[in-house]
Structure formats: structure tokens, C-alpha cells
Image (spheres, helix red, strand yellow):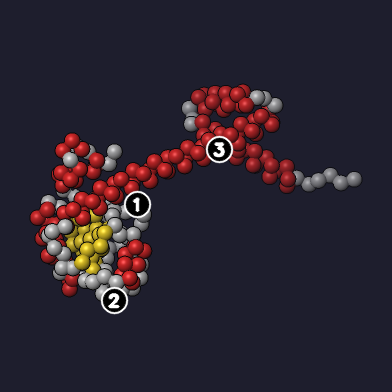
Amino acid sequence: MTSFDQHKHVGISRAILARKPSVLVLFPPEADGVSLLTQLKRIGCSVEICWPHPPFIDAHIDLIFLYIPPEVEQMDYGWLHESGPPIISVANFENPTLIDEALRIGVMAILMAPIKASGLLSTIITTLHQHAKNSRNSHRISQLEKKIINLKMLEEAKRILIAKQRISENEAYELIRSQAMSQRMPIEDIARDIIQSEKIMSKIINAAPKNTI
């Protein structure tokens, strides 16, 4: 459970605001980031303003407001990565080029400057809530993918033992399980070792010189 999901009995919005989200504002001086900073503080956020872009984003940052200049061009954001905080972009006007750049970056919302107080709170809460939901879903998918990989490894390890030891599938599984218990290792680690050992032996056999008559 993420920190944004705690205290659901008081409501999602109140839980998010009670946490005092840490917000990073990436605005140049001419973009009037101070006005946005004032509004964010009034909402109850912990706010930092930074320019130029930092090389990385501190782990405590929950949300980024990113200014996209009128002369839109693709930039290499060194701090940008999939597991980073959600981004709300801010621009002076909208056009297809700007929207494409925002989508490339992976922003979750676009606001037009000057930013009005009306709608800012709902945008922040919606963005943080949706990001937390996406993170949970990504974690579930990652766990399922890992489980599938482990099951495939176990099946392959069993096939190797069945072929080499001439035993049944149940006996192969029990052999792997008993080894995992005796060595205090996960079953998937034992399966991985069996597969790796088989690959090494195959390489050795294939590399050995063949007897010719």
C-alpha cells in the first residue's frame, strides 16, 4: 500500500493533502513560477523551485510541475525515468507540437499559464491518485511476470531431471523441493542452478573433440 492510499476512511483527497506532497517546480525566471509556488503553498504542499533542470530528482519529490517553453523542442531530461514522480506540464499556449512533446515526456496533465487557482487542487489530487494507482498496477504486473518466469524455469528444471534421472514429474518436483529446503533457498533458485548446470555440461560435451575412425 502506498502512502497516498493510507487513511482512506478520511477520503482520498484529504489523505493526499494531509501528507503535504513535496512538489518540485521546474520553471525559468521569466515563466513566473513564483505565482505557482504561492498557490501550491496555499494548498498545503511542500514546494521547491529550481532552474535550470537538475541532473536528478530527489527521492522525496512526489510531483513535478514542468514548464514547456513556447519554442517547443525535444529536450534530453536527464532526470526523467519511468519510476519517477508524476509530471504536470505548464505552457503559455497549446498546439499539436507542444502536446506531442508533453506526451513524449509522459506528463499526466497539461495546464495553461497563467495558472488559475480554480482547478489546480483537483489536477494535483487526480494526478497523484492516478500515479499511485498506476504504480500498484505496474507492481502487480511485474509480480505476475516474475511468477510466470519462475514457473517456466521450474518446468524446464523438472524436464531435465526427468530425462537425466529417469524419474517421474512428481519425483522431479520433490527432489527440487527437498534441495530447496535443505539449502534454505527458493525453489526457483534451485531450478535456475539445474538449468545453468545443464547448459554448462552441454557446452562441454559439444566442445569436446569428436573421435574419428
Question: Residue 107: x percent and y percent?
Answer: 30, 59
Mark 2 and mark 1: Cα distance apart in space = 28 Å
Residue placed most toward the observer, 193 or 112:
112
Residue in view at x 26 percent, y 59 percent: 109
Q: Nearer the viewer, mark 2 or mark 1?
A: 2
The quadrant of the image that shows the N terminus is top left
**Residue under pointer 3:** 152
**Disc 1: CA contacts within 10 A as few (<14), some (14-19) or many (>=20):** few
Name the image quarter holding residue 113. Answer: bottom left
Q: Is residue 78 visible?
A: no
Q: Position of residue 94 (x, y in %)?
A: 26, 70
Q: CA distance from mark 1 to mark 3?
A: 27 Å
Instruction: Give the residue type at disc 1.
Output: Ser
Q: Is residue 105 above or below residue 85?
A: below
Q: Residues within 10 Å of mark 2 (few under 14, many from 20)?
A: few
Looking at the rendered structure, the kind of residue marked 3 is: Lys
Q: Which residue is mark 1?
A: 83
Answer left or right for 138 relative to 147: left
On screen, residue 169 versus residue 22, left or right, reads right
Q: Looking at the image, which residue sits at the far right?
A: 213
Disc 1 on helix, strand or loop?
A: loop
Residue drawn at 51 percent across, 40 percent down = 149
The front one of 19 and 129 is 129
Give SS at disc 3. helix
Residue at 84 percent across and 44 percent down: it is 211
Spatial separation of the CA atoms under disc 2 and disc 3: 51 Å
Q: Secondary structure at mark 2?
A: loop
Q: Is residue 132 visible?
A: yes
* Label drawn at residue 71: 2
Instruction: Specify whether 203 is left or right of 112.
Output: right
Q: N-terminal of the two: label 2 or label 1?
A: 2
